[in-house]
């Protein structure tokens, strides 16, 4: 192959799937993010009117942001997976496993070195499970749904075995600093970490070759491979990113709750998928934004918080989120049908 042909293939690799994302995808996301953001604004306005100043207070806004940040970090990884046309049902279990491993290291080593080592172990544990997911999907040719459902059980089971089925206590310095501390005395550190993660992932998705290849694979993995994109390697990396972010979320969870909260993350996988889809990403792949995912993460948190403050039964939150999710998927399918 000549040097000129290789250059053309690389150029094609970076732009394959771009028309779908730039034309159909851009129009669809623009509309969907607009109406989902409008829904969020309407909800916040309604709760502000119903609950006087309680909902819109600085303390409550800070509480909403803190409640959303752990799921938001996991949702960022799920976004990349869904854009490629995959799915990851294991992120909740990866969070638990990574939290258990990190907590053990933190308590065994002790001090600042123990906390730093535990954070590294948590993130690396998540990346390792992500690599397993990626290899099962690409090399073993197992459906992402089945592969990640299997690793969900494996990761959760190992976490229970290692922890003897009980929650482990996180070091108090981690809780006092990252868990309840605030940057500049205003912004909770957890919220700042989630914000930085969102900015970094937005830059990666929109401003790098890695992001362009992610969209291209979601638009058509076959076309992307023909264009020279290393699809197998890229997918493994995407699942590793999702696992690594789940590992980071495990550290945030340890700091937030002070324990590994093993039984508190069984539904996290469904929650983050819901957040990504509510934010405009398509389960068929090729479409999604970080901005939409952030908004999609906030909606269920705002609903639950508003229901509690206004005295509405929290059970209605599940109905409302289910309704919005069905509408989001319906709009996705309709827009694809009308533009396809």
Image (tube, rainbow, N blue to C red):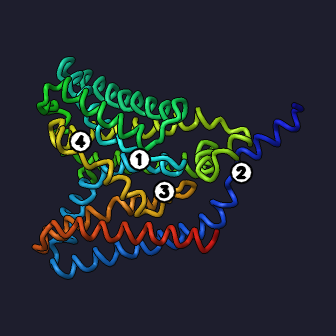
First-in-chain label (3 vs 4): 4
Give left or right: position of 186 versus 151.
Answer: left
Q: Which of 201 and 334 is in front in this view?
A: 334
Q: How crowded is mark 2: few (under 14 residues within 10 Å), some or many (20 or more)?
A: some
Residue underneath mark 2: 15
Residue under label 1: 196
Element type where label 2 sits in the image = helix
Where is residue 299? Give x, y as percent.
Answer: 31, 65
Decide which of tag 3 and tag 2 comes sooner along the chain: 2
Return the disc, 4 or 2, that comes first in the chain's sequence.
Answer: 2
Residue underneath mark 3: 283
Residue at numbered disc 4: 253
* Earlier sequence position, callout 2 versus callout 1: 2
At x 73%, y 41%, the residue is: 226
Q: Is mark 4 on a helix, strand or loop?
A: helix
- Rate crowding at label 3 as few (under 14), some (14 to 19) or many (20 or more) other CA atoms within 10 Å: many
Q: How far apart are marks 3 and 1 (CA)?
A: 26 Å
């Amino acid at each position: 192959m000549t040097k000129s042909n290789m250059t053309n293939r690389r150029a094609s690799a970076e732009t394959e799937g771009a028309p779908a994302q730039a034309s159909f995808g851009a129009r669809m996301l623009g509309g969907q993010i607009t109406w989902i953001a409008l829904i969020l604004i309407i909800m916040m306005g309604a709760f502000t009117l119903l609950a006087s100043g309680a909902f819109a207070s600085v303390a409550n806004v800070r509480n909403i942001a803190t409640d959303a940040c752990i799921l938001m970090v996991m949702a960022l990884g799920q976004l990349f997976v869904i854009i490629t046309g995959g799915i990851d049902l294991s992120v909740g279990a990866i969070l638990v496993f990574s939290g258990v491993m990190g907590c053990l290291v933190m308590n065994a080593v002790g001090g600042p070195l123990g906390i730093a080592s535990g954070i590294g172990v948590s993130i690396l544990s998540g990346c390792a499970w992500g690599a397993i997911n990626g290899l099962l999907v690409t090399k073993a040719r197992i459906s992402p749904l089945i592969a990640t459902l299997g690793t969900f059980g494996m990761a959760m089971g190992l976490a229970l075995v290692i922890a003897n089925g009980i929650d482990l206590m996180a070091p108090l310095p981690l809780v006092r600093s990252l868990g309840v501390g605030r940057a500049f005395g205003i912004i909770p550190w957890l919220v700042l970490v989630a914000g930085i993660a969102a900015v970094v992932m937005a830059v990666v998705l929109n401003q790098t070759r890695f992001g362009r290849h992610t969209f291209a694979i979601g638009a058509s993995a076959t076309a992307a491979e023909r264009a020279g994109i290393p699809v197998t390697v890229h997918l493994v990396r995407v699942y590793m990113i999702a696992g690594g972010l789940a590992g980071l979320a495990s550290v945030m969870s340890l700091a937030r709750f002070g324990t590994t909260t093993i039984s508190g993350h069984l539904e996290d996988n469904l929650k983050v998928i819901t957040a990504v889809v509510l934010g405009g990403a398509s389960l068929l792949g090729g479409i999604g934004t970080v901005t939409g995912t952030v908004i999609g993460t906030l909606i269920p948190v705002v609903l639950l918080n508003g229901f509690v403050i206004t005295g509405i039964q929290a059970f209605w939150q599940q109905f409302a989120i289910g309704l919005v999710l069905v509408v989001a998927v319906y709009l996705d399918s309709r827009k694809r049908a009308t533009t396809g």
